[in-house]
Image: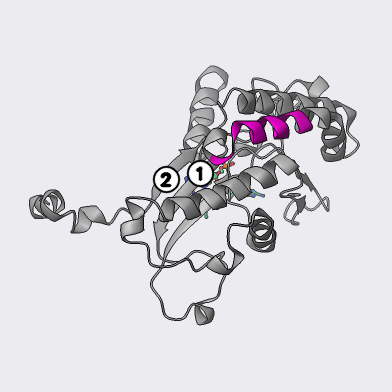
Amino acid sequence: MQEQLDLWYKSRSGLYSAAPRTLGLAAAFDLLSKDRVSELVNNARRDIDKYAFQYANGNDALQQGIKAQHEIALDLYDQDQQAPIELNVEPGYSGPTPLAGRGGKNFTTVSAVLYSPLSRGRSHITSTNATAQPAVDPVYLSHPMDVAVLIGGVQATRKVLRAPPLNSIFVEEFEPGTDIGGSDKRVEAYIRNVAGGDNHEVGTMPMMPRSLGGVVDTELKVYGIYNVRIVDAGIIPMPISSHLAATIYMIGEKVRDPFC
Ligand SMILES: Cc1cc2nc3c(=O)[nH]c(=O)nc-3n(C[C@H](O)[C@H](O)[C@H](O)COP(=O)(O)OP(=O)(O)OC[C@H]3O[C@@H](n4cnc5c(N)ncnc54)[C@H](O)[C@@H]3O)c2cc1C
């Protein structure tokens, strides 16, 4: 252990130099100009009813709930309090190209992860059989704010690699690839082609008032059903700027004492 620590302090090498991942959060104003964020917020406020209607899937109460969520998220954008993008630097390759297409090169991957989507997907049971898979439609990147911010995230990773200190070890960009230049449109096309979920789904059974389309109350009891509680990520009403596990442990801790 001491030997490895010495190596790290002396030459920044050894086991301590091999952090599996480095995560950073970017604020909206780190990614886009203030004017661009204002434009996106104004447009999203103007269209708030349209998108709430679209995402609510015919549920009038949920439409109000989604509208309330968007208002909260847009206020955060306005005040530059939103942390919409995670930049995730990890050794190795975790992109979309199969091994055979990677040309035997060594890789580091920087992923831009959208943390605060305004897009809202939907999930439904498909059968009365509890083991049947549900139908899930995440409707990724269906809100213009999400698209603009994720493009900003990808462009930020490209800039970071070309700026000190990483430019001293940066060799070349494999994806999206230098041939697309700085074009946001081409980055958007790339994202739409390859982007996927990051396993932090929430909100399938949101803790919200019933009048806003909520499914559980503040004691996590399902509305209208006697004594059934839900204690998992589904009750988190809207995306949070974090990975979920710690929050879910807290939900479990909170629910354990007063109710059981
Ligand atoms: C690949 C991957 C990597 C992740 N990495 C991280 C990370 O680094 N940090 C982080 O904070 N979060 C991470 N997450 C997210 C985190 O793991 C999830 O958000 C979290 O586990 C969700 O908790 P949950 O209790 O809602 O559901 P789950 O953890 O999925 O628990 C659901 C449980 O219900 C059980 N179950 C399902 N159906 C039935 C049934 N019919 N009867 C009985 N039991 C059933 C399942 O077996 C499972 O044990 C990751 C997720 C994935 C998929």
Q: Quadrant of residue 40?
A: top right
**Marked residue nearer the N-terminal end (1 or 2):** 2
Q: Which residue is mark 1?
A: 86
Q: Amino acid at mark 2?
A: Leu
Please name the residue that numbered disc 2 is placed on.
Answer: 23
- The image quadrant of residue 96 is bottom right
Question: Quadrant where the C terminus lies?
Answer: top right
Q: How is the image coloured?
A: one colour
Q: Visible in this render: residue 153?
A: yes
Magenta region, residue range: 31-43
Residue 112 position in % (x across, y down): 53, 50
Residue 32 falls within the magenta-colored stretch: yes
Residue under the image location 87 percent in, 34 percent down: 50
Residue 121: image location, x then y, percent: 75, 44
Q: Main secondary structure of the magenta part?
A: helix
Residue 231 against residue 151 in the figure, above or below: above
Q: Tell me the crowding category of disc 2: few under 14, some 14 to 19, or many 20 or more residues within 10 angstroms, Cα based.
A: few
The label shown at residue 108 is: none
- The image quarter in which residue 107 lies: bottom left
Foreground residue among 52 and 178: 178
State left or right for residue 22 relative to residue 226. Answer: left
Assess whether mark 2 and mark 1 are in contact (beta carbons under 8 angstroms): yes
The residue at 47%/51% (across/down) is: 159
Tell me where residue 38 appears, x and y as whole percent: 68, 29
